[in-house]
Image (tube, rainbow, N blue to C red):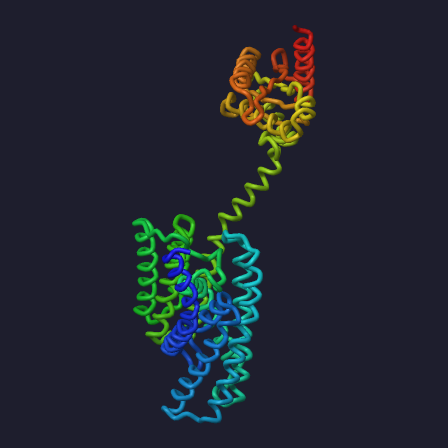
Amino acid sequence: MTDSQVVSAQGASWRPWLLHPLLLVLWLGSFLLAAALEHAPHASLWFPPAAVTFAGLFCVGWRAVPAIFVACVLGTWLTEASNNAGEVRLGVFAVSSLVFALIHTGAYALPAIVLRSIASNAPAELTLRAVSQFLLLGALGALLAAVLGTFGLSHTELLDAPDLFELAATWWIGDYAALVTLAPVLALLLRRVGGESGVRRFPPFEWGTWRFPRAASAKLALLLLATLAILLGYLELSNSRALLVVLVLPVVLQLWIVHTEDLASSQLGMLGFSLLTVGAAAGFDVGEDALVLQFAAISLAANTYLGLAAPALYAANKLLRDQVSHDGLTGALSRGYFEDFAALELAAAARRRQPAAIIMLDVDGLKDLNDTHGHAAGDLALRELVLRSQSCLGAGEYIARLSGDEFAVFLPGTDEAGARDVIRAIKQRLEASPVPSLGVHVSASFGIATTAGGVPSLSALLQAADQAMYADKRARRRSP
């Protein structure tokens, strides 16, 4: 091992220990931010510690529990001190800190560990399944933390609220709004600090190489300026709730960013929008409209993740279409897809009074090739035949695999002379060089059928071309 490798290994061994103080600092710092964002007694617009806990338990696992537990205890002390003008009731503090730490850690441990186990087998791209799992499990964790925390701390006398149900609802929304916005970014931060060892990746949400082009900067600036203008208009018009409906505009702008820029730009837009909305609600008396702003932040985050999952959905749909429409071995069109396509093209050619032709191909000596070199060699020969034939076809001309070694080429707008030119070009390509790695040439027999003299059905054309192909094969066998 070289000196640089030793230094690298030593660095990797101590870096994970940074995660514990980092989790503690992030949790307490975000707890103080949540206190500043409090819009009702014991109710915060945003509760970022929920995101820190969720991200820590997901990335680090059970090893994150001590740091989170200590942070919960210190957070309870800060709450008790602020509620009683700096005086701490030791009995209430002791029980409340234990109850809160157990409930908060346990409530988020369940969904985070479940998602952690699921993510180990998840694809690297962001899919609708990954998004749904994150959003639903995050909502479950926030709900458990809110309900259990509200009723648990009310019995320890730390919380004194006239309507526990309302407090639990606002608690839940505040936790969830921060979790869906911040958890993936915090997971990325923990991974960057802790390194590869012992830190679980959050693959679908990782930024990768961050590029910040000028176009992304302009779009983000437009998003933030539009959000700021709507919020300022809301304040200037005496908190007109109707104006908050216009927050749908930033959602549309964010979707524009999602579909045209990278993951980093999308998450920065989501963070900027959330910070502006919760900041406005914290800085001004928005009353019951705080809930509208929270839902706007959650809606934008959810739409961001769903939008980011769209490319994977498109790719999956394309793969399914290709599997249905193409032969898996050769890449030629499948028989069913070819027959549907050719029937439609024949009907269109008849309406336009244009010719059409079909060429049948049959590989010569495929059985002997399989017996001599193995079936893998036969498969390679079939793929090579399709590849070289496709290079001789123009736009709108396709080759399909009808059976084991039989292929058909459809040529719209082509007469018999044009079809013979195509056959000549394919033969030249086949004779130009042997199949790589086999050292043998692939040859084929050909047959042509055209629509000259009428518009026969597709089956009639295929039968005529098949008969012509076998006539060609017999003639070539008789020739010396």
Is residue 279 left or right of 118 when viewed as pictured? left
Quick check: 5 left or right of 221?
A: right
Q: Position of residue 446 (x, y in %)?
A: 62, 15
Q: Residue furthest top?
A: 480
Residue shown at 61%/12% (left/top)? 452
The number of callouts visible is: 0
The quarter of the rendered structure image containing the C terminus is top right
Q: Report whether 171 appears left or right of 381.
A: left
Q: Position of residue 190 (x, y in %)?
A: 42, 65
Please provide percent x and percent y for residue 179.
46, 68
The answer to whether any part of residue 58 appears in the image is yes
The structure residue drawn at horizontal position 37% and vertical position 61%, both measured from the top left corner, is 7
Task: Find residue 406 and report its horizontal and vertical position in percent.
Answer: 66, 23
Is residue 354 at least partly visible in the picture?
no
Residues 285 and 436: in front is 436
Of residue 390 and residue 453, the one placed in the foreground of this image is 390
Q: Can you say which quadrant of the picture contains the N terminus?
A: bottom left
| Front-most of residues 8 and 263 | 8
Q: Quadrant of residue 442?
A: top right
- Name the residue rendered at 61%, 33% in the picture: 329
Tell me which corner region of the image, top left, top right, bottom left or bottom right, holds residue 325: top right
In the rendered image, the vertical position of residue 108 relative to residue 151, given as above or below: above
